[in-house]
Image (cartoon, rainbow, N blue to C red):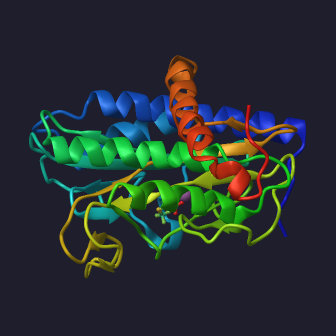
């Protein structure tokens, strides 16, 4: 069953998701060469607890930390360690929290120092793929239409989407129905309705899609050792579209640009009509 949240529940979800986004924005500021992923985790946990919230991942199926910090070929679920980040690395920081019974979940991948043009392009495409998915969200759309949009965009850039991990509903549990895959085909799965809350989180590999999990039981890496990036937002389906609960006010203009860029291309290609979806305005 997929829960449709009331306005007061959405208010609580907005609060915890804004908290997570606010802390992530601070964490990305301390990502410089020499910082350890444990250092990032310590600050994250301190900020979560200062706000009266609890880390959502710590203890979840035995996961040992507040954030997942996944470096370079690590896809997701990297465990913070004494490894120091170096210039040219990319690090995905994924964090969840619980406040007043409701969960927030958000991830960004951050360049460390100066990164290669290839790495920068992977980050750009992955974040834009997330926004292509978010832009599909509105009442009546089928869940797999989100993944179809993500996959289409990612593969048009020669990258691949990871199949083994998916986005998810989120609310009073970290993981609720439905699963939100990052691949199509579209037109499958439940129809979205007002009040549903989804964490959409594409994982994109520069090389092949295949991943494996290291012997620590958590860290997923690309089998071909290619770079991987991960971005995640939690969104709520509104009457006529979506609200990104993990979007900070200062990032709204940029988000609007990302959405507009996608729509301009779709209009040229006529894709929404071809997919049987109403054109967005
Ligand atoms: N954002 C990821 C997810 O929703 C992170 C989970 S890490 C875990 O699955 F430790 F909680 F599993
Ligand atoms: Co998630």
Is 246 drawn above or below residue 230 in the view shown?
above
* Camera-side residue of 10 and 98: 10
The image shows a total of numbered marks equal to 0
Residue at figure coordinates x 50%, y 59% from the top left: 152
Q: Position of residue 163 (x, y in %)?
A: 47, 74
Q: Position of residue 69 (x, y in %)?
A: 31, 53
Residue at figure coordinates x 84%, y 37% from the top left: 240
Is 60 drawn above or below residue 33 in the view shown?
below
Residue 29: image quadrant is top left
Residue 111 seen from this side: yes
Please indicate whether residue 219 sits to the left or right of residue 249 in the image. Answer: left
Please indicate whether residue 162 sits to the left or right of residue 181 in the image. Answer: left
* Camera-side residue of 50 and 228: 228
Residue 149: image quadrant is bottom right
Residue at figure coordinates x 54%, y 39% from the top left: 262
Q: Quadrant of the N terminus?
A: bottom right
* Camera-side residue of 169 and 275: 275
Q: Position of residue 253 (x, y in %)?
A: 54, 19
Residue 51 seen from this side: no
Q: Position of residue 124 (x, y in %)?
A: 35, 41
């Amino acid at each position: 069953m997929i829960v449709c949240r009331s306005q007061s529940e959405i208010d609580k979800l907005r609060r915890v998701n804004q908290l997570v986004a606010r802390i992530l924005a601070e964490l990305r500021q301390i990502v410089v060469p020499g910082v350890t992923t444990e250092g990032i985790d310590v600050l994250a946990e301190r900020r979560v607890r200062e706000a009266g919230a609890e880390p959502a991942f710590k203890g979840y199926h035995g996961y040992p930390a507040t954030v997942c910090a996944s470096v370079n070929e690590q896809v997701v679920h990297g465990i913070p360690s004494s490894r120091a980040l170096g210039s040219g690395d990319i690090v995905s920081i994924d964090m969840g929290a619980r406040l007043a019974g409701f969960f927030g979940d958000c991830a960004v991948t951050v360049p460390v120092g100066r990164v290669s043009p290839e790495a920068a392009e992977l980050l750009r495409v992955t974040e834009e793929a997330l926004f292509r998915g978010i832009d599909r969200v509105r009442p009546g759309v089928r869940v797999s239409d989100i993944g179809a949009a993500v996959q289409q965009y990612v593969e048009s850039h020669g990258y691949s989407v990871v199949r083994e991990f998916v986005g998810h509903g989120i609310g009073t549990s970290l993981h609720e129905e439905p699963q939100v895959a990052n691949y199509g085909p579209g037109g499958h799965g439940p129809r979205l309705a007002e009040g549903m809350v989804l964490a959409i989180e594409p994982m994109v590999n520069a090389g092949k899609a295949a991943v494996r999990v290291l012997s620590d039981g958590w860290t997923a890496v690309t089998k071909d050792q290619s770079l991987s990036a991960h971005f995640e937002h939690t969104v709520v389906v509104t009457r006529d579209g979506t609200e990104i609960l993990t979007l900070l006010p200062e990032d709204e203009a940029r988000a609007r640009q990302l959405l507009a860029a996608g729509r301009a291309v779709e209009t040229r290609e006529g894709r929404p009509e071809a997919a049987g979806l109403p054109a967005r305005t």
